Image (cartoon, helix red, strand yellow):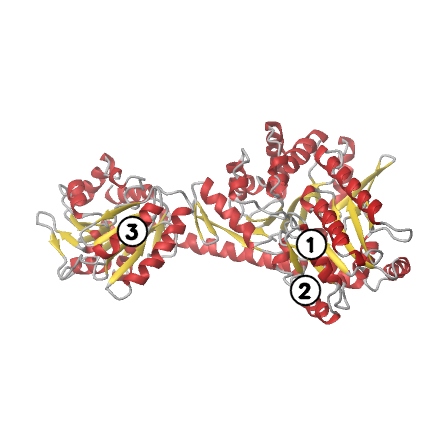
């Protein structure tokens, strides 16, 4: 029986010590609720830190108590908590990932402990993980864990979910251990983020910092596809709907009605954190009272700030700033019967929160950055009468789903003040329309839906990886091909050059053959049964210089020129190069605008290279150039070919597939092989008969039957043929 192993920094229990005895209480958190359906079933397990520093004598007893709940502890020392959790996780990753990099402290000791604790988690996971298990790792405290598990257990399915934002490349690159973090994350098969922006930032960082390729949202790590997807997290909406009818909640609502009977309530609930925008929210409320004095005594801001890390200097300063600002606003505006801000620095039971969600006319949620922000969804889920207005920061992940909220920039205090005025004056009908839409979203995309979606997608990714492995040319397949090769009497071998037999060079003239390649090609072409054809996009002069002395045939510039061994070059008849004078100025303009790009002119084609261009800019300009060229080339018989860091414009008649067919005309072969890495090589793969051995270099979608990963693998494969 395969099982699911959930791994997070904290276990979903609260452990309290009383007279040397440890008492366990299940946690009420949103994640614990959502994953409860998984970890409580069968042999499934949740692994994490129990939340307290447990003495060694008590550890076996707690392990036993936790086991009864399908939980498994990772015991951490106080020093580990200080450096891995308080240090690396909360003083490096948290500020940088929330765009507050000025607060980050890059201490080597933090990294050492982060690595050590992630290794500790790995060891506990590996104690229970078996082939076929699914491991789902949660959040930024365990970024190294997927990679650590993958290197020890390559076949397990690993999912990772990031509950906080992922920053743009410019911020992420500030972290000294950035590559190690990304490599750790790429150990997962499926990476989940709250928003498209987060997954996009991750993919951008990966492709700019690591030697990997990404196409759309698929990153190729060796020959394993890793997928980055968006899964906006939901809440347990039914819990909040049911709480609206709970007797204790109804009693507290009555009490709120008595206290604030003629007053509109604006509700704000946050943990103490600089990412939550609490100061700006208070400034906006102050501005609101200045701009709209008619609301004095008619509106209150009910502000709950839940204590968090207030021994840390930044948090302590933030707390003092909030106290001063709230006190100042109250001192300035209050009357005998009215305080504009009811400010609480403590946590409240869920019944009190539910009563406030039900009672407040306006939910004010304006973080500077937030992965999702579930308070906004809890407010919406509680509004069973479909009234009330949500004001939501565009920097919260929830703003991408709750589009019927009043969306504001949390830095723009004027906009927040105006949104408050709009919310308090919104007609009931408009409130109903907006809230109804948002409630539908919160109901449909709830926590159970989120869990189901993620797990289903993880299974799909594993199947996708399997289908790719089936196409990878395994050693068994290679020996089958070798046997067919040995038994055949007359063989045609088509080889592309760049990217297939040699790696890419930033300078195209540096890719000349090395001694090893010369030896390999000589051995192949010296066999009287072999007819070797080098079929390349290179200029015919270059191929002549590099390979003209070898006993093989040459097809240059994708088929514009052909040369049989011992004969002269022949040009494809009927070609014109007139069009080049019209397109060269366009390519020149793009070259001027893109530092590092250059133009290569062939007899009947033009090539714009961007292999030396800064990543990102090259892709942007190439898309722009393709769109511009399509407009000019549509009706003049030209083809635009996007390749690996190149765009080539050539006559439609020039085609590697046609060139291969023409070369094969009136000849019979009992073994055919074609290897290529480019878009242009697809024409050969499609042209050759079904029984031909066609091999793509790289694992992208292709008409080829098999793929190999690199030019080194191609050379090794060819060497094995001629042994």
The residue pinned by badge 3 equals 587
For the residues labelled 1 and 2, the Cα–Cα distance comes to: 20 Å
Q: Nearer the viewer, mark 1 or mark 2?
A: 1
Q: Which quadrant would the C terminus be assigned to in this image? A: top left
Please tell me how crowded label 2 is: few (under 14), some (14-19), or many (20+) other residues with Cα within 10 Å: many
Which quadrant would residue 547 be assigned to in this image?
A: top left
| Spot occupied by residue 473 in the image (x, y as percentages of width and height) | 36, 50
Residue at x-position 63% and y-position 40%: 94
Point out the tag, 3 or 2, that comes first from the N-terminus. 2
Point out the tag, 3 or 1, that comes first from the N-terminus. 1
Nearest to the observer: residue 680 or residue 673: 680
The residue pinned by badge 2 equals 438
The answer to whether one can see residue 430 in this image is: yes
- Tag 2 secondary structure: helix
- Tag 3 secondary structure: helix
| Spot occupied by residue 147 in the image (x, y as percentages of width and height) | 54, 41
| Spot occupied by residue 190 in the image (x, y as percentages of width and height) | 54, 51
The answer to whether one can see residue 36 in this image is: no
């Amino acid at each position: 029986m395969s099982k699911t192993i959930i791994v997070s920094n904290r276990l979903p229990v609260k452990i309290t010590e009383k007279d040397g005895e440890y008492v366990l209480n299940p946690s009420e958190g949103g994640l614990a609720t959502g994953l409860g359906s998984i970890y409580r079933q069968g042999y499934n397990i949740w692994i994490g830190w129990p939340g307290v520093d447990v003495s060694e004598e008590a550890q076996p007893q707690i392990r036993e108590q936790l086991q009864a709940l399908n939980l498994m502890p990772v015991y951490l020392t106080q020093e580990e908590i200080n450096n891995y959790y308080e240090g690396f996780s909360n003083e490096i990753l948290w500020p940088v990932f929330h765009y507050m990099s000025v607060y980050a402290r890059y201490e080597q000791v933090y990294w050492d402990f982060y690595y050590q604790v992630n290794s500790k988690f790995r060891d506990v996971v590996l104690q229970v993980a078996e082939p076929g298990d699914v491991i789902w790792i949660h959040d930024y405290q365990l970024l190294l864990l997927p990679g650590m598990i993958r290197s020890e257990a390559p076949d397990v399915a690993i999912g990772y979910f990031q509950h906080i934002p992922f920053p743009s490349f410019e911020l992420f690159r500030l972290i000294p251990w950035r590559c190690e973090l990304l490599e750790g994350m790429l150990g997962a098969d499926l990476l989940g983020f709250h928003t498209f922006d987060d997954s996009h930032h991750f993919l951008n960082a990966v492709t700019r910092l690591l030697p990997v390729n990404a196409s759309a949202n698929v990153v190729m790590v060796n020959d394993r596809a890793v997928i980055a997807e968006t899964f906006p997290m939901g809440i347990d909406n039914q819990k909040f709907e049911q709480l609206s009818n709970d007797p204790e909640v109804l009693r507290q609502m009555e009490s709120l009605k008595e206290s604030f009977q003629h007053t509109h309530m604006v509700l704000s609930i946050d943990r103490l954190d600089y990412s939550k925008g609490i100061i700006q929210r208070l400034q906006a409320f102050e501005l609101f009272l200045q701009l709209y004095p008619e609301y004095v005594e008619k509106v209150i801001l009910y502000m709950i700030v839940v204590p968090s890390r207030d021994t840390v200097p930044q948090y302590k300063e933030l707390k003092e700033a909030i106290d001063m600002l709230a006190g100042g606003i109250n001192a300035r505006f209050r009357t005998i019967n009215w305080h504009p801000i009811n400010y609480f620095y403590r946590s409240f039971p869920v019944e009190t929160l539910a009563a406030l969600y039900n009672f407040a006319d306006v939910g004010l949620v304006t973080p500077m950055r937030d992965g999702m922000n579930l308070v906004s969804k809890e407010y919406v889920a509680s509004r069973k009468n479909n009234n009330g207005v949500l004001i939501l920061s565009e920097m919260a992940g929830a703003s991408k789903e709750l589009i019927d909220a009043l969306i504001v920039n949390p830095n723009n205090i004027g906009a927040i003040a105006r949104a408050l005025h709009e919310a308090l004056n919104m007609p009931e009908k408009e409130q109903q329309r907006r809230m109804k839409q948002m409630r539908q979203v919160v109901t449909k995309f709830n926590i159970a839906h989120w869990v189901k979606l993620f797990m289903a997608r993880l299974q799909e990714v594993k199947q996708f990886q399997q289908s790719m492995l089936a196409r990878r040319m395994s050693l068994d397949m290679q020996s089958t091909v070798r046997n067919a090769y040995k038994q055949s009497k007359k063989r045609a071998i088509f080889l592309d050059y760049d990217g297939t037999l040699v790696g890419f060079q930033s300078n195209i003239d540096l890719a000349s053959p090395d001694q090893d390649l010369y030896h390999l090609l000589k051995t192949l072409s010296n066999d009287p049964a072999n007819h070797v054809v080098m079929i390349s996009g290179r200029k015919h002069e270059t191929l002549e210089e590099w390979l003209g002395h070898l006993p093989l045939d040459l097809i240059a510039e994708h088929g514009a020129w052909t040369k049989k061994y011992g004969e002269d070059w022949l040009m494809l008849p009927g070609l014109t190069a007139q069009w080049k004078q019209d397109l060269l100025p366009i390519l020149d303009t793009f070259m001027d605008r893109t530092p590092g790009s250059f133009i290569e002119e062939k007899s009947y084609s033009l090539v714009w290279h961007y292999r030396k261009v800064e990543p990102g800019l090259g892709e942007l300009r190439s898309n722009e150039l393709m769109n511009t060229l399509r407009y000019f080339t549509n009706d003049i018989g030209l083809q635009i070919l996007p390749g690996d860091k190149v765009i080539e414009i050539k006559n439609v008649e020039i085609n590697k597939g046609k060139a291969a067919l023409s070369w094969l005309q009136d000849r019979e072969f009992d073994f055919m092989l074609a290897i290529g890495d480019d878009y242009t090589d697809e024409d050969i793969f499609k042209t050759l008969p079904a029984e031909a051995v066609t091999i793509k270099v790289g694992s992208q979608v292709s008409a080829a039957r098999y793929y190999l990963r690199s030019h080194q693998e191609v050379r090794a494969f060819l060497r094995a043929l001629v042994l």
